[in-house]
Image: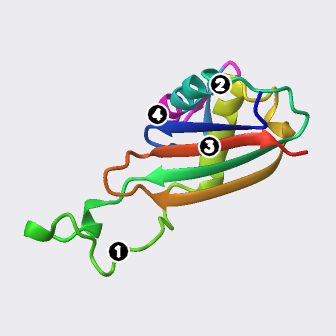
Amino acid sequence: MSALVEIDVTGVPAPQGSKRHVGNGVMLESSKKVKPWRAAVAAETQGHTFEAWPFVTVAVWFRLKRPKSHYRTGRFAHLLKDTAPAYPAQYPDLDKLCRSTLDALRMGGAFKDDAQVVKLHAYKVYAGQGEEPGALIRVASAL
């Protein structure tokens, strides 16, 4: 077995936000996008074999779709405007993206408890031209 597992998930990365109480001790996730994202990450994760590492390192690159407003118009619509930002320094929050993704990795069997993650490297980038939104995730032993 490898000391590094790489997972490439296609889909819209969704942040794990607040939960709301609906009664009788039942809490519901406030974002409807979280469930499909966690399901996509868990499904990709289940296709890999993981060692029972006591300490885990996770590196994740979230690929977010660029807004149409970042592109020029007309015959140059495939080109970015000079004013288009290099990084998505806006919603969704990086820490909340990590929360939903770590929960999904646990659900998919990457580790028993996300408390085992002792190193976390996370990045938000825009998906390149021809690239789908999603995430590249690397899970490894922290030893």
- Callout 4 environment at 10 Å: few (<14), some (14 to 19), or many (20+)? few
- The magenta segment: 24-37
> Which residue is situated farthest in the bottom direction here?
82
Judging by the rendered image, the residue that carries numbered circle 4 is 32
Which quarter of the figure has residue 3? top right
Q: Earlier in the sequence, mark 4 or mark 3?
A: 4
- Callout 2 environment at 10 Å: few (<14), some (14 to 19), or many (20+)? few
Q: Residue 42's spot in the image, x, y percent?
A: 60, 26
Q: CA distance from mark 1 to mark 2?
A: 37 Å
Q: Earlier in the sequence, mark 4 or mark 1?
A: 4
Q: Is residue 31 magenta?
A: yes
Q: Earlier in the sequence, mark 2 or mark 3?
A: 2
Judging by the rendered image, the residue that carries numbered circle 3 is 137
Q: CA distance from mark 4 to mark 1?
A: 29 Å
- Callout 1 environment at 10 Å: few (<14), some (14 to 19), or many (20+)? some
Three-letter code for the amino acid on which mark 4 is drawn: Lys
Query: Would you say the residues marked 1 and 2 are in contact, meaning their CB atoms lie under 8 Å apart?
Result: no
Three-letter code for the amino acid on which mark 1 is drawn: Ala
Of badges 4 and 3, the one in the foreground is 3
Q: Name above or below for residue 73 compared with residue 126.
A: below
Q: Tell me the residue at 88%/40% (across/down).
A: 55
Q: Residue 15's spot in the image, x, y percent?
A: 56, 45
Q: CA distance from mark 4 to mark 3?
A: 22 Å
Q: CA distance from mark 2 to mark 3?
A: 12 Å
Query: Would you say the residues marked 4 and 1 are in contact, meaning their CB atoms lie under 8 Å apart?
Result: no
Q: Residue 8's spot in the image, x, y percent?
A: 53, 38
Which mark is drawn over residue 84? 1
Query: Would you say the residues marked 4 and 2 are in contact, meaning their CB atoms lie under 8 Å apart?
Result: no
Q: Is residue 7 magenta?
A: no
Element type where label 4 sits in the image = loop
Judging by the rendered image, the residue that carries numbered circle 2 is 48
